[in-house]
Amino acid sequence: MKRRYAKLPQLFGRLPKAKLEVVATQPFREKEAASADYDPGALRAWADRIRSQPWAEAFVFFKHEDEGLGPKLAHRFLELWNGG
């Protein structure tokens, strides 16, 4: 932290007047699943794993599929998310 504080004048042209504090902000986590398999069990496991987190929001992206399955997988994920 001291090394970062020392770089503030270089980055911003000055030091802050108030004491520098590091605090947690909105919980956020990005989890890439590019190597994931999207069989029904895996989709359900992902939905359950994400639902169990303390996050206020989650953004779920599916890897590029040469077959164009992304929208279909997203629809099934939403069904599972909503209890289906």
Image (tube, rainbow, N blue to C red):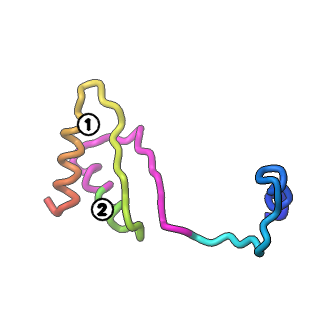
The amino acid on which the numbered mark 2 sits, given as a three-letter code, is Asp
For marks 2 and 1, the one nearer the N-term is 2
Q: Is residue 16 above or below residue 65?
A: below
Q: Residue at x 37, y 42 (%)?
A: 36
For label 1, count other residues whose C-alpha is less than 10 Å away and answer few (under 14), some (14-19) or many (20+): some
Measuring from the top left, give residue 46's x and y in whole percent: 32, 54
Measuring from the top left, give residue 51's x and y in whole percent: 32, 65
* Residue 39 part of the magenta-drawn span: yes
Measuring from the top left, give residue 22's x and y in whole percent: 68, 70
Q: Is residue 77 above or below residue 6?
A: above
Residue 60 appears left or right of 72 = right
The amino acid on which the numbered mark 1 sits, given as a three-letter code, is Gly
Q: Which image quadrant for residue 33?
A: top left
Q: Residue at x 86, y 59 (%)?
A: 6
Q: Residue at x 76, y 74 (%)?
A: 18
Name the residue carrying label 1: 70
For label 2, count other residues whose C-alpha is less than 10 Å away and answer few (under 14), some (14-19) or many (20+): few
Mark 2 touching mark 1, by CB under 8 A? Answer: no
Spatial CA distance of label 2 from label 1 is 19 Å
Q: Residue at x 63, y 72 (%)?
A: 23
Q: Hey, which residue is sitting farthest top in the picture?
A: 66
Give, as a single range, the part of the protein colored magenta: 25-46
Nearest the viewer among 80 and 8 is 8
Measuring from the top left, give residue 25's x and y in whole percent: 54, 68
Quarter of the image that includes the C terminus: bottom left
Name the residue carrying label 2: 48
Nearest the viewer among 77 and 2 is 2
Please, what secondary structure does the residue beneath circle 1 have? helix
Quarter of the image that includes the N terminus: bottom right
Please, what secondary structure does the residue beneath circle 2 have? helix
* Residue 32 part of the magenta-drawn span: yes
